[in-house]
Amino acid sequence: MRSRIVGKVMLPVAALFILSFLVFRERAGIGVDETDAAVRGWETVYTEGIEQKPECLILTSDEDICEVYLDMVELVCTGMKVGYDIYRVNEGFDGSVLDDYDTAIVIFQDWTVFDDKLMLVFSWVKNGGRLLAAVTPEVDAHFNAVSAKFGIELTDGYPEIYGLKFKNGCMIGADEDDIFWYDRQQEEGIVSSLQVQLKNDCEVYVTSEDGAVPILWTNNYGAGRVAMINQAVTEKYQRGLINLAYSALYDAFVYPVINASAFYLDDFPSPIPNGNAEYIKRDYGVDVASFYTNIWWTKMLEWEQKYGIVHTGLIIENYSDEVEAPYEGNKATSRFLKFGNMLLNNGGELGFHGYNHMPLCLEGVDENKKYGEYRQWKSEQDMGAAIRELRAFSEELFPDNEFCVYVPPSNILSEEGRRILLETDPQIKVIASTFLRDAQGIAYEQEFVVEEDGVISTPRITSGCIIDDYQMLVALSELNFQFVQSHFTHPDDTMDEDRGAALGWKYMSDSLEQYLDWVYRSAPDIRNVTGSGMGRAVERYDRLTLAREYTDEGIRLKLGSFSGEASFLMRINNGTIERTSGCSFEHISGSMYLLTAVSDEVMIYIGGAR
Ligand SMILES: [Zn+2]
């Protein structure tokens, strides 16, 4: 019995694995600690930090799935600034351990490890505890003994699920009838959710695409509440579900967010790149240079106007394949000046992409990072000389721009390359690579964090003109979990069939505009930032610490490591915000509010609870 159910639940993991190979994947896990953090950051003044009290107990076991889950749940708790401890239930469980915590998250499927102490968990809930089952449990005698406490009346097999629907405005960017598909190209659905029939007074937040299978819900039990995510949660887009389920344990829950939206133009400005100009000729009858100036760039400017976007352009000095000094450089600077200055005059920013488009990987060292036609740099000195050449070239053209953002070519950056970049160029503060893994597993995958060496990682979440189903799920998740949007595109997307060139620029730009419409319809007040602005926002978010106190009147926050600027999302499941002190607030949509702190003492008064 057990192996069959595990088999069923493992299937979606495999399915998602294949699915996500369509987009960027692979964890790079690069950590560098040679450089001094103090040199890197901006001179932001922070108040003293607060030690966060562990309010949550993560209950883990020895199942394989727990390793994936623990990483995800820890990351979401850290992001929401929820202090937590970890407890291994398979090594013996003493129910009284729960008494020290407000919440508990179960990240395993086999509940028999609770042994004869399972009822202690539910007496803790009955007395006011809040319990989240973050993965569909196995249906066995142990689970059946408590399934009614989750509001479950009946279970009936494991149906295929093709997408998700979000109810009652619980997610920014998801209207009542919107379906967020896993992958419309895929004929088979994902099999990891249990078909359940719930009693009427459960609060259902997420269902399958057809509404038939509850995927995320809560049920009040005694003075406490339980929540369940009826799915295997193994992918980055599902962090939004963990965040939603955790906040649904409370009538109102508030958590800090990045509050930033950035758009990067990779390879811009640059010389006119090589590529297949066939489709530009077919549709517009012009050469590549005039297409860029009159059609592509005009569209970028239109979007700046329409949405308030500020672009960050990433310079490529030339498209040579030189990997050994001395370098040719580039004397043809008029294109750079024309586009670069227009971009800067509109409030944009310029950063570095590369002397040329060869990723910072060393010959003989980074052989595992080889990709396509790219050549690897001959030596550390040769790589360093190219980085210095790029700074000299760029600063001469744009003396007023602070070059502190680096975007690795093709999102490839080796550990050695990263070290050499930072040692050669101490002014680089921010590295913006990719949030998702790539099919080859060589991309430099990042989280929104300040790394141990003080460099700020600001990954790009979505890319290109055609945002597929999987990218939309990730975008939705990050908009709700960290209130962040980050996208990159290239002017030469129109010359690359893999990025949709054959569909023509009209189709491509219409698709991207649909995404932009979605972002700014969903989050009209999100801050538009440049690459360094994103870096600053991530730094402030990452450093912030807080203490939450639930009172009869609402929620009190005491902020630590506060820079004078902090944003929060608040999800109100029951009641309304009556007034606040120490922060302003605005309604975004449904049950979601954006809060902006102006003081390190914040009080949110909540009334009208049922
Ligand atoms: Zn590029």
Image (spheres, helix red, strand yellow):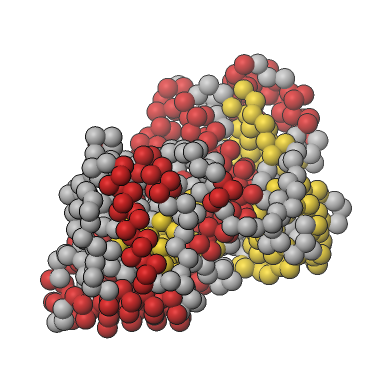
**Residue at (61%, 32%) from the top-left corner?**
106
Say left or right for 252 vs 444: right
Q: From the image, which quarter does the C terminus lie in?
A: bottom right
What is the residue that sits farthest to the front in this orientation? 326
**Residue at (40%, 72%) from the top-left corner?**
398
Q: Is residue 82 above or below residue 535?
A: above
Q: Is residue 330 above or below residue 156?
A: below
Q: Position of residue 388 (x, y in %)?
A: 35, 55
For residue 574, which quarter of the picture? bottom right
Q: Position of residue 456 (x, y in %)?
A: 51, 51
Say left or right for 349 vs 493: right
Q: Position of residue 604 (x, y in %)?
A: 79, 60
**Residue at (54%, 44%) from the top-left corner?**
36
Q: Position of residue 255 (x, y in %)?
A: 67, 53
Q: Which residue occupies the foreground of this view, 497 or 123?
A: 497
Say whether residue 399 is visible.
Answer: yes
**Residue at (55%, 29%) from the top-left corner?**
108
Q: Which residue occupies the foreground of this view, 13 or 374?
A: 374
Say whether residue 247 is visible.
Answer: no
Q: Is residue 199 above or below residue 292?
A: above
For residue 51, which quarter of the picture? top right
Q: From the image, which quarter does the N terminus lie in?
A: top left
In this figure, what is the number of numbered marks?
A: 0
